[in-house]
Amino acid sequence: MFCPSCGKELKDDSKFCKYCGCKIKSRNNQSNISNVSKNDSADSEDRNQKILIGVLIAAIAILAIVFVAFGTGLFNNGHSASSGGSSQQYSSVSSSSNPVSLSSFPVSEAPALASAIRSSGGNFPVQFKSLSLSKSQCLYILTKSIYLIGNGNPNAVISVGDPSYASHPTGRDSPQNILQVNYVDMCKRFSTWIEGNGAIPNYVGVYQSGVADISPSTLLEICIDILIDYGNSKSLPPSINV
């Protein structure tokens, strides 16, 4: 090797230049310094990569929580709290300004509920938006909605409550055609009975000569047909077949 100061040739293991006295840095020391520098750089890159991976994992976790929250309705404004009994009170405030809940169920949502019941295949409770509705609650909502629509209150809001089901449901359910004026009156009497007794009546009569009484289950099917038709045409059908 050569002295870095005077340039004279020296032995490879020399520590000082015998000509000028300059201290000689060994190649091993230089190599070690270089290796340390490289190792520090590599460690720094590893730390940066770990930090970046940690940030990405945290961001993915936050996005997953947000998607799950939206999917489960955590950010919805609906409320599922129930109230005891059934109320005879309703308001004529437009449903667009009210959440769908047991204490405030918009009549305008009744056609969608009818479709949900039909899609469920008659299995209860039916999941509708933020609500889980029993057969009794669905019967009250649909009959009350038909009565209100038939009397010019399509934007009314119903307090549903939690009526019990009929204790001894009966009805001959004979094939028949029921006019609009009769099925609206039938729905009025049925829903009014629920409001007064906190329970579904065992049957409902059409009060038309030669027409048989109707069971709660058949009335539910009738109301579903009426409201699905109403949802499509925006008018109640002139009659309905049983």
Image (cartoon, rainbow, N blue to C red):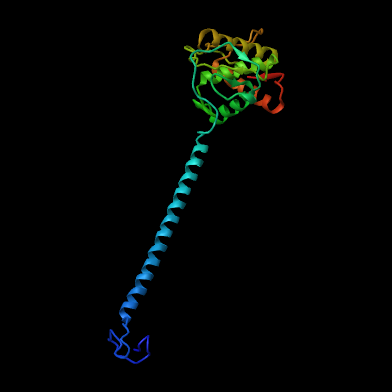
- The residue lying at 37 percent from left, 86 percent from top is 5
- The residue lying at 71 percent from left, 26 percent from top is 233
Q: Is residue 176 visible?
A: no
User: On the rendered image, what quadrant is the N terminus found in?
Assistant: bottom left
Q: With 180 as the anchor, is 203 left or right in this view?
A: left
- The residue lying at 41 percent from left, 57 percent from top is 50
In this rendering, the answer to whether 32 lies above or below 46 is below
Could you say where residue 220 lies in the image, as x and y percent from the top left? 57, 20
Could you say where residue 91 lies in the image, as x and y percent from the top left? 63, 15
In the depicted view, which residue is nearer to us: 12 or 70? 12
Could you say where residue 16 lies in the image, as x and y percent from the top left? 29, 85
Q: Is residue 80 visible?
A: yes
In the depicted view, which residue is nearer to us: 139 or 9? 9
- The residue lying at 56 percent from left, 9 percent from top is 193
Could you say where residue 197 lies in the image, as x and y percent from the top left? 51, 8
In the depicted view, which residue is nearer to us: 220 or 101? 101
Query: Toward which corner of the image does residue 194 lie, by quadrant?
Result: top right
